[in-house]
């Protein structure tokens, strides 16, 4: 372990190791708080190091209930970058999706919470550039936290570019490549377009689709199945990716009947292949979600109509004005929730199952 990190932080264990680095659980000896220490396992170019520093510095000033805080950063004597992060106890959305799609109210809650976090990112001049289920954390109270903010993405993009060019990818980076390709906007994959607010909106659209259906939108398969197709099918990476991007996603309600038509439209707009047809900002997406969030709020206030299964929590309760108890959308939402038997309860005692995109 790096001495300069150990002088300030007491390392209590390894949370996760991957192709891009190692995430440690630790205690801050000075402030007495639990933290996560992420050490990248590769040296970076001068340009990448400068980008890392500027991004982390901007992130350290963001204080938002749905953003995992950045406390400190530095560089080891060996030239490896590290960052000290808020440590969250709970589950990642990727872990939750291992048992299938999420209940409607939880999906909407996650979508709105991440959109709120992105609004804070973009207002601070920061692009997340790595929205995916493994970077969205749900703590024991049900609060959603967006983590990682793409500090490894510049290197990941280089690996993806080599992969699309036909190069073999080392085992530790295979999931990173598949995950990145599955959540990158088409213009990034096909034309190398620079990230912007609209690419963040697309990645969030992919993630919302996954929470509602348990499938990726363009492959119609789970993340694991899509990874296998990308990496082990025997076809060229470029061929597989072109096929995926040429496909049109099914409406989420065809895979999950509890999804109301307005939410279908929201998700498909976020997934528009032409950037100008997507939501341009997080505010636009939040405004589109407000009527649905308003319905979920009425369910929370009217237990006789919806019961506990239909309640929304946290930021998902903020929404539009009241909707009458006889609202067709309200009935549709509540009946869809009652019909589900795979509710995923947040608040696991397991500490940090998520991977912070290692």
Image (cartoon, helix red, strand yellow):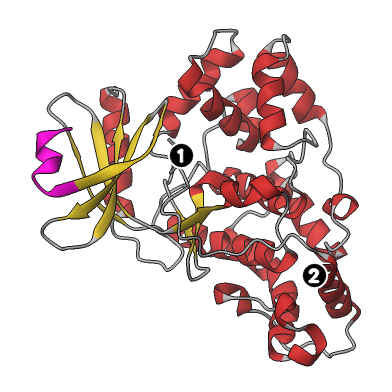
Q: Is residue 79 above or below residue 257?
A: above
Nearer to the camera, 8 or 353: 353
Per the image, label 2 sits on a secondary structure element best described as helix
Quarter placement of the N terminus:
top left
Element type where label 1 sits in the image: loop
Magenta-drawn stretch contains 83: no
Q: Say which of 238 and 194 sits in front.
A: 238
Q: Tell me where residue 5 sits by quadrant.
A: top left
Mark 1 vs 2, N-terminal side: 2
Residue located beneath label 2 in the image: 337
The magenta stretch is 1-10
The image's mark for residue 44 is none
Q: Are marks 1 and 2 in contact (CB under 8 Å)?
A: no
Find disc 1 in the rendering and name its residue: 357
Please indicate, yes or no, whether residue 284 appears anywhere in the rendered image.
no
- Other-residue count near label 1 (Cα within 10 Å), few / some / many at <14 / 14–19 / ≥20: many
Residue 323 is drawn in which quadrant? bottom right
Q: Quadrant of residue 274?
A: top right
Residue drawn at the location 54% of the way across and 9% of the way down: 168
**In the picture shown, does residue 280 fall above or below 1?**
below
Quarter occupied by the C terminus: top left
């Amino acid at each position: 372990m790096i001495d300069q990190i150990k002088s300030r932080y007491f390392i209590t264990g390894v949370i996760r190791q991957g192709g891009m680095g190692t995430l440690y659980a630790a205690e801050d000896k000075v402030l007495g708080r639990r933290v996560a220490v992420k050490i990248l396992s590769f040296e970076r170019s001068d340009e990448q190091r400068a980008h890392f520093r500027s991004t982390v510095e901007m992130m350290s000033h963001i204080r938002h209930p749905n953003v995992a805080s950045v406390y400190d950063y530095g560089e080891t004597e060996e030239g490896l970058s590290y960052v000290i992060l808020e440590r969250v106890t709970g589950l990642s959305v990727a872990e939750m999706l291992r048992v299938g799609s999420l209940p409607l109210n939880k999906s909407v809650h996650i979508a709105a919470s991440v959109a709120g976090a992105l609004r804070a990112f973009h207002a601070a001049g920061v692009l997340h550039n790595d929205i995916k289920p493994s970077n969205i954390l749900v703590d024991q109270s049900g609060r959603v936290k967006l983590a990682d903010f793409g500090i490894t993405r510049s290197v990941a993009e280089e690996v993806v570019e080599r992969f699309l060019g036909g190069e073999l990818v080392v085992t530790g980076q295979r999931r990173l490549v598949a995950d990145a390709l599955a959540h990158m906007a088409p213009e990034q994959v096909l034309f190398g377009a620079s990230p912007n607010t609209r690419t963040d909106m697309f990645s969030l659209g992919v993630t919302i689709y996954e929470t509602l259906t348990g499938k990726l939108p363009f492959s119609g398969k789970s993340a694991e199945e899509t990874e296998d197709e990308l990496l082990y099918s025997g076809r060229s990476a470029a061929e597989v990716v072109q096929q995926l991007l040429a496909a049109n996603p099914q409406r989420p309600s065809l895979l999950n009947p509890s999804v109301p038509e307005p939410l279908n439209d929201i998700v498909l707009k976020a997934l528009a292949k032409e950037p100008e047809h997507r939501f341009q900002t997080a505010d636009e997406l939040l405004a589109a979600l407000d009527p649905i969030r308003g319905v979920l709020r009425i369910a929370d206030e009217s237990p006789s109509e919806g019961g506990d299964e239909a309640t929304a929590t946290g930021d998902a309760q903020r929404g539009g004005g009241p909707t009458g108890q006889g609202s067709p959308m309200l009935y549709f939402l509540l009946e869809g929730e009652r019909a589900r038997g795979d509710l995923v309860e947040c608040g696991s005692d397991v500490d940090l199952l998520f991977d912070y995109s290692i």
